[in-house]
Image (spheres, rainbow, N blue to C red):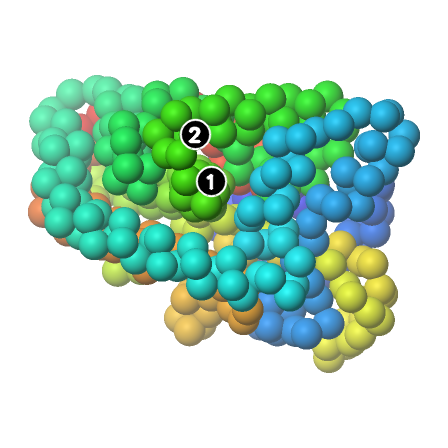
């Protein structure tokens, strides 16, 4: 099994546990180290010898070779904290954190009612699609608060998160540029402040798909652990990370323990191995570590805690009937999760 199949395999917990190696080299288009060792992942996240790998080099090659422009991708690369120059990165994070704090105050006031309303179908016996009938409505209402206006339904499938991936084909980049353009057009219709448009875009890129994935996979795991005599319960801390894969680039030759990395190496971090670790202290690092740790960690945890409180209180007994996802090398996109509540 290739590394890009691990994070979405239905039996991935067992797959991670049974990996014959925790670190290995894959050489296709890029020399890529795959790391599924929790301790090494934490060290690499904190290492000054690694950096967030961005799309600048990819875009330069595309422009030179194919003579095309991608204005919306360019715009996004100048806004997203992980893609801006290191000298302005701290200021971008600080200003976005200020915007997010204001949205968090409003979210706190509305979240209990939103979660109670959206999870209500789980309290009734029968079969239904948890994605369409529970999670998508929840995501729309929560992210409408971040966007300060009703979130369009098509944002649920626009997947601007893919700007963080490394699909470098011209067709993919053109399609991504068009999707980002449509998203920006909608956001600019809600605000004349270009900075605020940027903050809203950041919320979508780092929040929408990742929070949806975190909640959906956590609920799937909880339901798989229930039966007619035992109600489903969510863990105290999410064990399914919304960002199952993260990347770093080696800034220079360096070594950590027995592992040596060369300048320019791409390092693929299989973040789920942190969640599945026997060492509980590793679980908290699913939100990253160091200078690029997740700014939205507290938002994600607030949403998870509200969902856990309501979900556990329903004492649901049920089963997964069918679980369909859209293949992706970097995240899990859920098509549907059909369940039966007893």
Query: Within 10 angstroms of label 1, few (less than 14), some, or many (20 or more) residues?
Result: few
Residue drawn where x is 49% and y is 29% of the image = 184
- Whether residue 248 sits left or right of residue 225 in the image: it is right
Task: From this view, report whether residue 17 is shown above or below residue 124.
Answer: below
Q: Position of residue 149 (x, y in %)?
A: 28, 31
Q: Position of residue 98 (x, y in %)?
A: 36, 59
Q: Residue furthest bottom?
A: 257
Q: Residue furthest right?
A: 65
Depth check, front residue: 124 or 52: 52
- Which numbered marker is on residue 7? none
Query: Within 10 angstroms of label 2, few (less than 14), some, or many (20 or more) residues?
Result: some
Residue drawn where x is 78% and y is 76% of the image = 255
Residue drawn where x is 17% and y is 32% of the image = 118
Kindly indicate whether the residue at mark 2 contacts the one at mark 1 (C-beta within 8 angstroms). Answer: yes
Residue 155 visible in the current orientation? no
Total marks in image:
2
The N terminus is located in which quarter? top right
Residue 296, quarter of the rendered image: bottom left
Residue 72 visible in the current orientation? yes
Q: Which residue is mark 1?
A: 194
Q: Which residue is mark 2?
A: 188
For mark 2, give the secondary structure: helix
The C terminus is located in which quarter? top left
Q: Position of residue 69 (x, y in %)?
A: 75, 27
Residue drawn where x is 67% and y is 45% of the image = 3
């Amino acid at each position: 099994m290739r590394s890009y199949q691990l994070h979405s395999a239905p039996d991935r917990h067992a797959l991670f546990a049974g990996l014959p190696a925790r670190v290995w080299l894959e050489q296709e288009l890029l020399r890529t180290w795959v790391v599924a060792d929790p301790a090494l992942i934490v060290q690499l996240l904190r290492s000054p010898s690694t950096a967030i790998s961005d799309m600048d080099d990819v875009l330069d090659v595309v422009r030179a070779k194919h003579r095309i422009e991608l204005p919306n991708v360019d715009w996004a690369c100048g806004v997203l904290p992980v893609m801006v120059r290191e000298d302005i990165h701290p200021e971008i994070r600080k200003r976005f954190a200020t915007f997010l704090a204001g949205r968090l105050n409003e979210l706190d006031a509305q979240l209990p009612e939103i979660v109670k309303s959206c999870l209500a179908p789980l309290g009734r016996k029968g079969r239904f699609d948890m994605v369409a009938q529970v999670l998508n409505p929840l995501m729309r209402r929560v992210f409408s608060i971040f966007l300060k206006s009703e979130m369009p339904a098509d944002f649920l499938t626009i997947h601007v998160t893919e700007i963080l991936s490394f699909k470098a084909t011209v067709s993919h980049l053109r399609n991504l540029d068009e999707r980002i353009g449509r998203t920006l057009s909608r956001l600019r219709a809600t605000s004349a402040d270009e900075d605020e448009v940027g903050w809203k875009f950041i919320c979508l890129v780092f929040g929408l798909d990742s929070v949806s994935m975190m909640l959906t996979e956590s609920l799937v795991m909880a339901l798989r652990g229930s039966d007619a005599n035992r109600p489903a319960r969510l863990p105290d801390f999410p064990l399914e990370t919304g960002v199952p894969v993260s990347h770093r680039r080696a800034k220079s030759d360096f070594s950590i323990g027995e592992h040596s990395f060369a300048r320019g190496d791409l390092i693929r971090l299989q973040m789920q191995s942190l969640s599945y670790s026997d060492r509980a202290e590793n679980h908290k690092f699913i939100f990253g570590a160091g200078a690029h740790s997740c700014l939205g960690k507290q938002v994600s945890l607030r949403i998870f805690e509200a969902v856990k409180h309501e979900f556990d209180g329903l004492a649901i007994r049920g089963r997964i009937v069918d679980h369909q996802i859209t293949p992706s090398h970097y995240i899990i996109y859920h098509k549907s999760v059909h369940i039966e509540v007893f």
